Amino acid sequence: MANLYIGLVHYPIMNKHKEVITTAITNYDIHDIARASITYDVSKYFVIHNIPAQRELAATIMEHWKSGFGSTYNPDRKDAFTGVELVNSIAVAVRTIEELEGVKPIVATTDARTYDNTISYVRMREHLENEGRPVLVLFGTGYGMTKETMESFDYILEPIYGHGEYNHLSVRSAVSIILDRLRGEAWWNK
């Protein structure tokens, strides 16, 4: 089975006016995605932020749960942060995986739209189950990553569609759904 990595990208991100911005670190995103990552056996969860002060904030939040009061208040949450790494760019995350694995990962991302290189969850899951090349799935914050950034990836996972017409999930909800689709129990085979 191929190793799965994920990254939460804060730059380059689009705002609702299609301007390139950097989004802020969110405590819940770090914490909840770390818990989902360990649940679904993600090899490493990268928090990707280009501003040092924001990485310092993320480190402070993580230290609360790893060695601060949070580590004794709720020891289970301490384990969730063992696979979280703060990096300053997508390129650093890719290089880190390449150093760990000895091969460049397949890089995929998510979007609420489809593209020429859109891949289904079934195909990505099959790759993870049957191939050895690691996969890095990136999740954008704000209104998603810039078009130029998206075009540099190998694949874009198909959108998550709910039953209704509204389609704008929080990133931590999307991460949990996608991790379950890629690594969760194959309940449909039962």
Image (cartoon, rainbow, N blue to C red):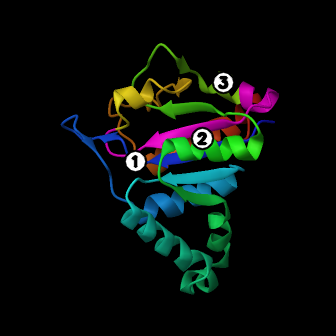
Query: Is 58 part of what is drawn in magenta?
Result: no
N-term-proximal mark, 1 vs 2: 2
Q: Which residue is mark 3?
A: 122
Q: What residue do we see at 72% from left, 50% from top?
A: 41
N-term-proximal mark, 2 vs 3: 2
Q: What residue do we see at 31% from left, 49% from top?
A: 22
Chain part drawn in magenta: 126-143
Q: Quadrant of residue 79?
A: bottom right
Q: Which residue is mark 2?
A: 94
Q: Residues within 10 Å of mark 3 (few under 14, many from 20)?
A: few
50 vs 30, nearest the viewer: 50
Image mark for residue 170: 1
Separation of marks 2 and 3 at Cα, in angstroms: 24 Å
Could one spot residue 190 in this view of the protein?
no
140 vs 52, nearest the viewer: 52
Q: Position of residue 134 (x, y in %)?
A: 71, 36
